[in-house]
Amino acid sequence: MMTQFACPVCKGYRWIPSGTFRYAGRDHQLGGRCYANSYVQLRRRVLFEVWFPDSKQVELKTQYCDECGFMCYTPRPDARDVDLKYAFLKEREVNIGAQHRLSERGVQMDRKRARRVFREIKRRKLGMGKSVLDIGGGDGKLLFPFIDDQWDCYLVDHNPNPRPGITRLGATVVDVPVETTFDVIICSHVIEHLADPVSFLESMKRLMRPEGIAYLEVPLEIWKQIPIAEEPVTHINFFTAASFANLLNEAKFKAIRINSIVGSYGGTRLEVVWAVARPVAEAISVRAVGAAATAARLDPGPIRKLIRVLFVETRLSGSVRPVVGLFRQAWTRLFARPRIRET
C-alpha cells in the first residue's frame, strides 16, 4: 500500500484532504456487524488479511487532486495489491464479476443499459467492421444487442463463464493474442478498480483498429464523500465528468462525446459518466477544471441536493418523467459537463 504517490491521472502532488474513515477488524468476524453481509464481509477480509495483514484497525484518508480533480484514498493499493485482491476473491467467490440473484427489474435495467451503449456506438461507427471487445464485462451482459446485430463479440474478464455467442479471450487484456485488434472496445465500470488507469487506457489502444472507437463508463460516486464507509476494496478511483475528461486526455484519447446521466448498474440507479472516444497521437493542451467540480460535489448546495433527490434517489412515475427530463437536460448543461481551461 502506498502512502506517498503522485496523482494517477495527472501525476501532480497537490492533494486536498477531505475526510477520514476507520475500520475495525472485529466487524467482519463472527458476530460483527458486517458478518451477515457476505459481499462486504469478504471485502473486509481483503482489507485486513491481504492489504493490512495482522492489523486490528485500518485508517484511510480521502483526498482529491487540486490539479485534475481525481479522488481516492490513502494509503492507496498499488498494482500488486489489486492483483492480490482478485486472487483472494477468485478463490472464494463463484463467478467473480457476475451479479447473482438479480431481480427482473435489474435484468431489464441492464438490458436498457446495453441498448444505450449499442446506440451510442452505432451512431459513430463509420464504415468500420463489426468486431467488439468488452473488457471487464462480467459474463458479457452488455453485448446482447451486438450479438443480435451479427457482430463478432469477444470478452476478457475474471468471470470464466461468458454468455452464448461470446468468445472469452482470457481474464485480462494481457491474454488477448498479439496483433489482435477490434473495431469497438467497451470498458464499462472497470476503470474505478485499477491502480494505474492511464497505463491501462494506453495499453488498450494497441487492441484498437486505426479507425476504432471506445465506449468508456465509470460511476459518478462522489457525493459529500466517496462511498467507502462499508468497504473500500471494490472501488479505488472516483471521478467527476471533469476528472474523467482529464483522464482520457492524459491517456491520449479524444472524447467524441462525454456526458453525465442517471444510469444503472444491475438493479441500482446511479449517476454515471460515459464517453465515446478515439485514440490520438498527442494529448490536447487543455485540461478540464477538475478540482472545482469535485469540491462542488463534496459540498453540494441546496439546488444540487434537490436535483439529486429528483433524479437519483426517487422513482418517478411515467406521467412526470418527460417534465423532469427537461430539467435533467438543463442540469447536465449547467453542472455536469466538464469545463475546459488552458494548461
Image (tube, helix red, strand yellow):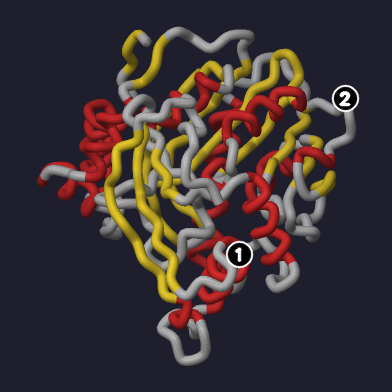
Q: Residue furthest bottom?
A: 31
Q: As rendered, which of 256 and 191 lies closer to the eye?
A: 191
Q: As rendered, which of 290 and 184 lies closer to the eye?
A: 290
Reading the image, the residue beneath label 2 is 179
Q: Residues within 10 Å of mark 2 (few under 14, many from 20)?
A: few
Residue 37 shown left or right of residue 173 in the figure: left
Q: In the rendered view of the protein, which quadrant contains the C terminus? A: top left
Q: Amino acid at mark 1?
A: Gln
Residue 160 shown left or right of residue 301 in the figure: right
Residue 161 position in % (x across, y down): 79, 60
Residue 213 position in % (x across, y down): 64, 23
Spatial CA span between label 2 and label 1: 32 Å
Residue 186 position in % (x across, y down): 64, 36
Residue 208 position in % (x across, y down): 73, 23
Which picture quadrant has residue 309?
A: bottom left
Q: Is residue 232 above or below residue 166?
A: below
Residue 82 shown left or right of residue 183 in the figure: left
User: Which structural element holds mark 2?
Assistant: loop
Q: Is residue 139 above or below residue 328?
A: below
Residue 332 visible in image: yes
Q: Residue at x 80, y 47 (%)?
A: 166
Reading the image, the residue beneath label 1 is 99
Residue 102 visible in image: no
Q: Residue at x 47, y 46 (%)?
A: 3
Q: Residue at x 38, y 39 (%)?
A: 261
Which picture quadrant has residue 314?
A: bottom left
Q: Earlier in the sequence, mark 2 or mark 1?
A: 1
Q: Residue at x 28, y 32 (%)?
A: 293
Q: Amino acid at mark 2?
A: Glu
